[in-house]
């Protein structure tokens, strides 16, 4: 599990007012926003107790007096898609929001594969240059955690979808919105509320967690924990551990980072092409400290203006010096982009030196983003920093497993719901898309309950009925196995499939989109296209084939098993010139699985058999972390869903 530093953990309740306060609204209301068409439009905020507040949206107007708690709420009559419109909120002061559109608003949530930005997806340069959609609007909720439900997000505002605004936005969210806009021709609002590496229970409300037998004890601990005091203690422990690591670092001695000195001897330093994880550049099994250095030239005018140096994400911690002066450092945020401002007095005309000290605690390490994330800029000046860097290992070991630095989003249930979902409720929405599950894979059986609870929880909290909830099934990942074996990820995919029993849900398979060595596959366009197909089916009631073939039933005839599928669209299809089906395994009563032969019988049925199993009782398909060679589709080119016909206990059964 990755380490997280706390961004904020403030024990605020929903009720907060200032005496004689101006009218205020949550940040989710701003100019350029999209409001949900075809339903009453909730608008709310705060003012002085008893103050009369009037909200106008064109010719629609509602007035209300605030309660003693200072909260006011109105609902405006439904409106059709279109715009632009203007909203005016009046009381003792006046707030005006412009360029508002009515359309469909979608929540985009989950962990890093939903968080993954457009700038790091396939064909990023082309996608960004073409991202000029004035009727698609983007809102990103800042990362934050809280022990109590918060009334508002940190500073944020709606943005137009432009080449300037789209690069850091959720790639799945943006591509999904673009697909819907192309199909529906109505404004689309996308609310990106994501945090990499997080578990589902952190996105669930305390009311639901309190009734969960596996999680309610952690909630009780949270309610009785003094978080600021606990964090202070944890930070001291981590600082002590870092001192031990520094003592092992050859580039640090006598209290000084000597290799950061511009006059340090760098003869003998090797070269590495960046960006890249250093494990991919020959530094296998190095958990410790690696130093990087590179010269870059600046014109005189640029040096006088100051620069911004961008290094992309660094796994796990970094310290950055320019010409021997420390300009920035971030600890324990492997997925944060590093951006540091450098004052003119640090710079000089001609050659300048940047030194980066990277600490890695486990797994991959290094400056690992994309080439377009490494650069120095100032005004119109832009210089790439991708390419050859010099490096030297400070230490290839760590003193011990690092202690936790502070409570993060996975430390307790409900922390992300409180800070990143609750402030959005009850903003009008069409539905939600969700890409998460990797962090719950080791508890896949438990996820059957947790994920369904989350969906029902959000629906109950929003009070807008059983709104569409669409999700991505985990992609194939990790090294393929030579023989059939147990799989946590297969069990998590099974849990996701089971969640389709809830009304108004849909699932986009990514089983053929993953990458063995990267948990973040770059083809977010196809993921989004499949999510959009689910949306057209579930949310817009269009007659489209929105899913690949799914297991329906089985029958055994002698030594063969016949598998019937549903959602076959125009019929089953094998992606193989010779018609060979792959990915099926078969077992008898001994529960030993063997690779099986499989053939199409007709447009809905497959027959499965093996010389190793004379009396078959169970069949599995795609049952692996990375079933990389699956080739059963429907004629609409959507992949068959992984499944098993047995219910034998899995490797995650009983894990909490």
Image (cartoon, helix red, strand yellow):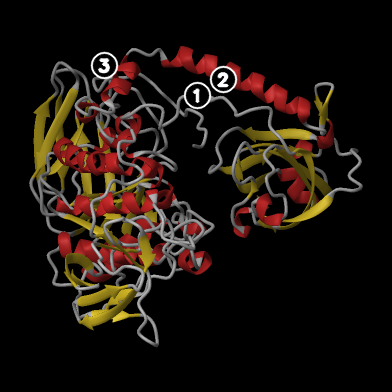
Q: In which quarter of the image is residue 137?
A: bottom left
Asked if marks 1 and 2 touch (Cβ < 8 Å), the reply is yes
Q: Earlier in the sequence, mark 2 or mark 3?
A: 3
Residue 463's tag is none
Residue for badge 3 = 20
- Residue 251: which quarter of the image? top right
Mark 1 and mark 3 residues within 8 Å of each other at the beta carbon? no
User: Which mark is in front, 2 or 3?
Assistant: 2
Where 353 falls versus 419 (above or below)?
A: below
Front in this rendered view, residue 351 or 83: 351
Q: Is mark 1 on a helix, strand or loop?
A: loop
Which of the numbered marks, if any, corresponds to residue 235?
A: 2
Q: In this view, does 500 lie above or below 243?
A: below
Question: In screen coordinates, is 71 left or right of 196?
Answer: left
**Residue drawn at (44%, 43%), measured in percent from left and top?**
196
The image position of residue 257, as x and y in percent, is: 80, 30
């Amino acid at each position: 599990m990755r380490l997280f530093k706390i961004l904020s953990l403030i024990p605020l309740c929903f009720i907060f007012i200032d005496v004689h306060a101006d009218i205020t609204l949550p940040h989710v209301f701003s100019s350029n926003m999209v409001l949900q068409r075809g339903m009453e439009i909730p608008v709310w905020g705060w003012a002085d107790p008893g103050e009369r507040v009037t909200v106008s949206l064109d010719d629609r107007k509602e007035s209300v007096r605030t309660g003693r708690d200072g909260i006011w709420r109105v609902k405006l009559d439904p409106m059709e898609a279109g715009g632009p419109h203007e909203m005016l909120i009046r009381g003792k002061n006046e707030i005006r929001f412009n360029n508002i559109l009515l359309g469909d608003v979608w929540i985009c949530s989950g962990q890093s594969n939903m968080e993954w930005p457009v700038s790091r997806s396939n064909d990023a340069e082309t996608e960004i240059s073409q991202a000029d959609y004035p009727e698609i609007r983007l809102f990103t909720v800042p990362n934050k955690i809280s022990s109590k439900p918060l009334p508002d997000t940190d500073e944020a505002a709606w943005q137009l979808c432009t080449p300037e605004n789209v690069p850091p936005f959720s790639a799945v969210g943006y591509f999904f919105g673009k697909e819907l806009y192309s199909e529906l021709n109505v404004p689309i609002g996308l609310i990106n509320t994501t945090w990499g590496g997080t578990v589902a229970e952190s996105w669930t409300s305390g009311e639901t967690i309190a009734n969960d037998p596996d999680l309610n004890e952690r909630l009780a601990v949270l309610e009785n924990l003094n978080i600021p005091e606990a964090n202070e203690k944890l930070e001291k422990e981590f600082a002590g551990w870092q001192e031990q690591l520094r003592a092992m670092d050859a580039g640090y001695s006598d209290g000084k980072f000597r290799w950061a000195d511009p006059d340090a001897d760098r003869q003998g330093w090797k070269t590495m092409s960046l960006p890249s994880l250093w494990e991919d550049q020959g530094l296998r099994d190095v958990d410790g400290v690696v130093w990087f250095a590179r010269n870059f030239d600046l014109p005189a005018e640029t040096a006088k203006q100051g620069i911004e140096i961008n290094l992309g994400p660094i796994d796990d911690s970094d310290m950055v010096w320019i010409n021997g002066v420390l300009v920035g450092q971030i600890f324990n945020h492997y997925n944060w982009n590093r951006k540091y401002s450098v004052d003119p007095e640090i710079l000089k005309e001609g050659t300048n030196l940047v030194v980066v000290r990277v600490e890695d605690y486990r797994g991959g390490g290094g400056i690992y983003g994309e080439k377009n994330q490494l650069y120095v800029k100032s005004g119109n000046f832009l210089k790439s920093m991708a390419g050859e860097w010099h490096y030297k290992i400070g230490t290839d070991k760590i003193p011990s497993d690092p202690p936790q630095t502070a409570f993060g989003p996975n430390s307790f249930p409900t922390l992300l719901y409180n800070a990143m979902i609750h402030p959005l409720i009850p903003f009008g929405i069409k539905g939600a898309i969700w890409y998460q599950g990797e962090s719950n894979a080791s508890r896949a059986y438990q996820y059957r309950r947790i994920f369904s609870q989350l969906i029902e929880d959000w629906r109950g909290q929003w009070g807008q009925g059983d709104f569409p909830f669409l999700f991505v099934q985990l992609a194939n990942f990790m090294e393929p196995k030579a023989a059939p074996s147990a799989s946590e990820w297969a069990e998590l995919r099974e849990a996701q499939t089971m969640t389709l029993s809830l009304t108004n849900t849909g699932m986009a398979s990514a089983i053929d989109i993953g990458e063995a060595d990267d948990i973040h596959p770059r083809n977010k366009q196809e993921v989004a296209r499949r999510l959009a197909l689910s949306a057209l089916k579930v949310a817009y009631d269009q007659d489209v084939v929105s899913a690949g073939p799914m297991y329906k039933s089985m029958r055994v005839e002698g030594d063969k098993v016949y598998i019937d599928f549903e959602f076959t669209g125009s019929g089953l299809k094998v992606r193989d010139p010779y018609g060979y089906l792959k990915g099926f395994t078969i077992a008898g009563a001994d529960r030993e699985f063997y690779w099986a032969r499989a053939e199409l019988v007709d447009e809905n049925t497959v027959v499965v058999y093996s010389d190793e199993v004379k009396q078959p009782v169970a069949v599995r398909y795609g049952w692996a972390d990375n079933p990389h060679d699956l080739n059963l589709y429907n004629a609409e080119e959507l992949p068959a869903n992984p499944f098993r016909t047995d219910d034998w206990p899995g490797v995650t059964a009983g894990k909490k």
